[in-house]
Image (cartoon, rainbow, N blue to C red):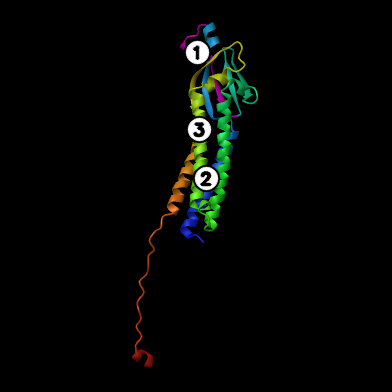
Amino acid sequence: MPGCFKKTLFALASLISFASFILIVAAMGTPKWMTGKILCKTGADLVNATDPELVKFIGEIYYGLFRGGKIRQCGLGGRRSKFTIFPHMVKKLNTGLHVMIIMFLCVAILFSLVSFGFCILNAIKVPYRAINGPAGACLWNFFAGGFVVLAVTSFMAAVKFHHLTERIANFRENIFQFVVLEERFEDCFWICVASATAHAVNLLLIAISGIHFPQIKTKTEEVNVTAEDIMY
């Protein structure tokens, strides 16, 4: 049986792995990975709008991995609309990269659950095989955190290098052209970053569990029994 200190660390690591699983699932299902402000360039150019008048042509956009919405401001008031990434819009985006982001997160979810199981196993008993012990728990945590990092990095690449926000804003816009003025990574994106950080913390906890701290031994007095003591 593992010691009390080791049990506590692996129990904490299992809770962190499960929390990471919940965070990734929640982040994937919510539509606010990115928000931004979009300018209706066509409308602004038609009326030759100056800086004070540009406010009438600045709308908003938000989106996640599967859906989102925007407010179009083209001089006649705001018009709200919602959209889904699949099955049509994704064809206008970098399809391979977008699907890869989702696949990376799905694999990270799987490895988070495996990490949770391995940490529970190590908290209950000392496994006979090394792969089932702390080394295995480290391996699965490394994979889980690594795939989250790949997903986050790929999403950043899609936004910055493949102009994801602009492509989404101009999807099925036959008359008006929109230009992105501002972009912000939102809570769901940072939740995934927190998930990767959680697995890094797990690696640290598992490393600490392998440290053998010196045991404090109490000095016992030696009792000498003599013949005189036996007589009395």
Mark 1: amino acid: Leu
Residue at 37% from the left image edge and 69% from the top image edge: 218
Nearer the N terminus, badge 3 or badge 1?
1
Rendered position, 44 above or below 70 = above
Numbered disc in front, either 2 or 1: 2
Q: Which mark is residue 43?
A: none
Is any atom of residue 185 visible in this view?
no
Write the start and end of the magenta stretch as one range.
47-65
Tell me the CA gap for discs 2 and 3: 18 Å
Numbered disc in front, either 3 or 1: 3
Query: Where, quadrant-wise, is the C terminus in this rendering?
Result: bottom left
Tell me the CA gap for discs 2 and 1: 51 Å
Rendered position, 59 above or below 200 = above
Residue 48: within the magenta? yes
Helix, strand or loop for disc 1: helix
What residue did someone put label 1 on? 54
Tell me the CA gap for discs 3 and 1: 33 Å
Residue at 36% from the left image edge and 74% from the top image edge: 220
Mark 3: amino acid: Val
Is any atom of residue 9 visible in this view?
yes
Give residue 2's position: percent from left, percent from top.
49, 59
What residue did someone put label 2 on? 140
Rendered position, 89 above or below 50 = below
Give the image quarter of residue 19.
Answer: top right
Total label count? 3
Nearer the N terminus, badge 2 or badge 1?
1
Give residue 51's position: percent from left, percent from top.
46, 12
Numbered disc in front, either 2 or 3: 2
What residue did someone put label 3 on? 152
Nearer the N terminus, badge 2 or badge 3?
2
